[in-house]
Amino acid sequence: MTALTVPWGYVMILDDQPVSMRVRNDAPHLVALDIDGTLLVTGQRVPEPTVLAVQLVRSRKHHVVLASGRSLTGILPVAKELGITDGWVVASNGAVTARLCDTCANGYMLEDVLTFDVGPVAQMALSRFPDVQIGVEEIGVGYRVNRTFAPHEVNGAQRVVPVGGLGVLPASRAILRGPDVLDLLEPLRRHGVTATQAGPDWIDVTPRHLSKATSLETIRATLGVPQLNTFAVGDGLNDIEMLSWAARAVAMGHAPEAVKAIAHETVGDISQHGVIQALKTLI
């Protein structure tokens, strides 16, 4: 048995996994990683043992792709913590795909941006719930909002605008938040957008027929990684499509049962560094 001791006393066992947990790692994999609840606790930094595990996976020439419901503005600091300065990221539940690049302005270039008309969505939400809180993503900047969110709830600058200003431009993602807002999930889907529950009082709205998986599949084809070598780790309802897409899908231990049911394996929860348990099988 071989063990790798990383700082702060965390030990990664490399070759004692059950057969079902082993993968052939002699060819590059596309490794899709959710952020909040998988790599870190929301509002906190990535734990240093997790940083090391990701760096070791990348040193084996695997393609680590951060795939998150976060805006691009929220993903970039996490990529920096992980030492990822090149490669792909999937933001806004798949609506925004970007390439990280040392020599690019702001450290990235946009590869694919999908948008929808926010105006009718905002009108529908406000007609049902006049007090609903709405945020409309501005890529690389922050959000147009009707009321400010707490700083830890969204990434980037917030600009309060009149209700009519929320839908002045097409957007990649909008947030609807408020009591009973989940009642809008099906009406929004019938309207022709993707509506994803992101909390008990929170809906992410993105363009139609979109998920993390749709963007990851485009990246996989571009990189030429065989579908058999796709690997994903997540914990949220917005990870279900990504886990369904991956040839090897891993759910975090604290994930809802609906997420665990899709995954091939379940690891420890966020407090147990479950993502490291998954990543070590690639090292």
Image: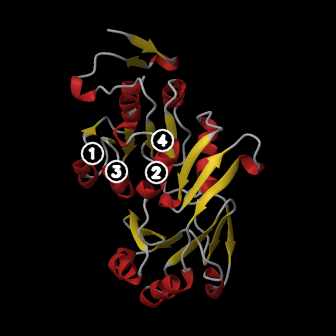
Q: Earlier in the sequence, mark 3 or mark 2?
A: 2
Disc 4/disc 3 C-alpha distance (Å): 16 Å
Tell me the number on the disc at residue 245.
3
Q: Amino acid at mark 1?
A: Ala
> What kind of element bears circle 3?
helix
- Whether pointer 4 and pointer 3 mark residues with C-beta atoms closer than 8 Å, the reply is no
Q: In the visual, does 256 lie left or right of 271?
A: left
Callout 4 secondary element: loop
SS at mark 1 in the image: loop
* Residue that label 2 marks: 216
Q: Is residue 87 above or below residue 130?
A: above
Query: Closest to the observer: 55 or 146?
Result: 55
Distance of mark 1 from mark 4, alpha carbons?
Answer: 24 Å
Q: How many C-alpha atoms fall within 10 Å of the one at disc 2: few (<14), some, or many (≥20)?
A: many
Question: Could you tell me residue 224's position as x and y percent?
Answer: 48, 41
- Amino acid at the residue labelled 4: Gly
Coordinates of residue 264 in the picture (x, y in percent): 25, 41
Quadrant of image for the N terminus: top left
Q: Which label lies toward us, 4 or 3? A: 4
Q: Determine which residue is flagged by label 4.
A: 224
Marks 1,4: beta carbons within 8 A: no
Mark 4 and mark 3 lie on one chain; the one further toward the N terminus is 4
Which mark is on residue 263? 1
The residue that appears at 23% across and 23% down in the rendered structure is 18
Distance of mark 2 from mark 1, alpha carbons?
17 Å
